[in-house]
Image (tube, rainbow, N blue to C red):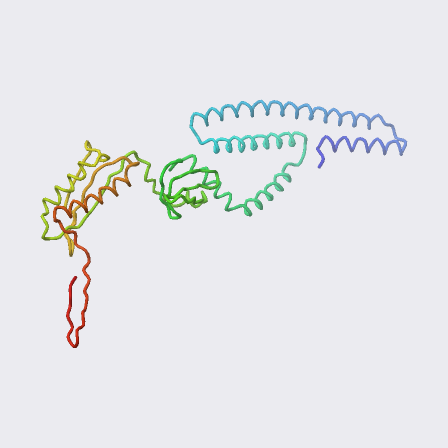
Amino acid sequence: METGAGTELKEAIQGAADAVRSGNPLSPVMENMGTAVLGLAWKLALACVIFLAGRKLIAVLRKMMNRSLDRAGIDVGVAKFLRSLTEFCLNAFLVFLILGQLGMDTASIIAILGAAGLALSLSLQESLANLAGGIVILVMKPFRVGDYIVCTLGEGTVSAVGLVYTTLMTVDNRAITIPNGVLSNSTVTNTTAMEHRRLDLTVGISYTADLKKAKEILEQIYRAYPAVEQEKELTVYVDSLGERAVILGARGWVSANDYWQARWDITEQIKLRFDEEGIGIPYRQQLDLVVTGNAAKEEDT
């Protein structure tokens, strides 16, 4: 590919060669050659000025971007990716500007690069979607490393958030690797996003049991458990009247880190205290049919 000044210089040299072969005077030809050389030199000098000024401007813009990213507190991986992408785009623009100044046909170069970029993006469609999802997650921060999240592909503690994949560690120490493209477009529940969680429990008691006593026991258990925050609201209530039981509910607040242990401990204490106080918890009865000779006897156990 030749520049405009390069073409003029080539034509001047060809004209000089033709003049020598034909015996014509060389003065006009040499003038044309001199003009072409001066034009090429001027364009090269202007291209050098554009290059130096462009590199200076890119350095200034890079410093401004670094300060902005640092103030925004963006993840290190995303910040590095954005810096590299921005610098590549600015340098590419500078190169095309210089080529245009030298008279090259930049339109054909852009067309070739565009076709190559389209083919590459189609072949890496899933990877680019995951990359975009990773940037969204790292910038918007719906969860962070150490949070416990629940999504359609699994649940666990976030151990790593990369540009392409997010890794979860389950409670039984299994690693789940989820593509960020899927994760960023699905519903995610962050159970540790807030410092405190409300611990809601329900339990059924028999219709013949002492309702007020059962409510007092529930309140006592919640009050006595050390992880339950006593300064926050604590409620014991009748949730519903079921077919086989009266459903009681209790609500209290605990730290997000203590939630599961508190839930397990309080559930166990409810069963033990109800047994001690003679408050029955109904369960589905089984109908046994005992056949003796020709007679059939039903036993309800």
| Quadrant of the drawing holding the N terminus | top right
Q: Is residue 1 placed above or below 69 in the rendered structure?
A: below
Q: Position of residue 93 (x, y in %)?
A: 58, 32
| Quadrant of the drawing holding the C terminus | bottom left
Q: How many marks?
A: 0
- The one nearer the camera, 227 or 76, is 227
At 19% from the left and 31% from the top, the residue drawn is 231
**In the current view of this chain or complex, which residue is farthest to the front?**
293
**In the current view of this chain or complex, which residue is farthest to the bottom?**
294
Q: Is residue 7 left or right of residue 99?
A: right
Q: Position of residue 49 (x, y in %)?
A: 64, 22
Q: Position of residue 110 (x, y in %)?
A: 61, 39
Q: Is residue 20 placed above or below 290 in the rendered structure?
A: above
Q: Position of residue 148 (x, y in %)?
A: 35, 40
- The one nearer the camera, 256 or 239, is 256
At 72% from the left and 30% from the top, the residue drawn is 5
At 60% from the left and 22% from the top, the residue drawn is 53
- The one nearer the camera, 295 or 90, is 295
Q: Is residue 63 left or right of residue 171?
A: right
- The one nearer the camera, 231 or 70, is 231
Q: Is residue 287 placed above or below 264 in the rendered structure?
A: below
At 40% from the left and 43% from the top, the residue drawn is 173
Q: Quadrant of residue 26?
A: top right
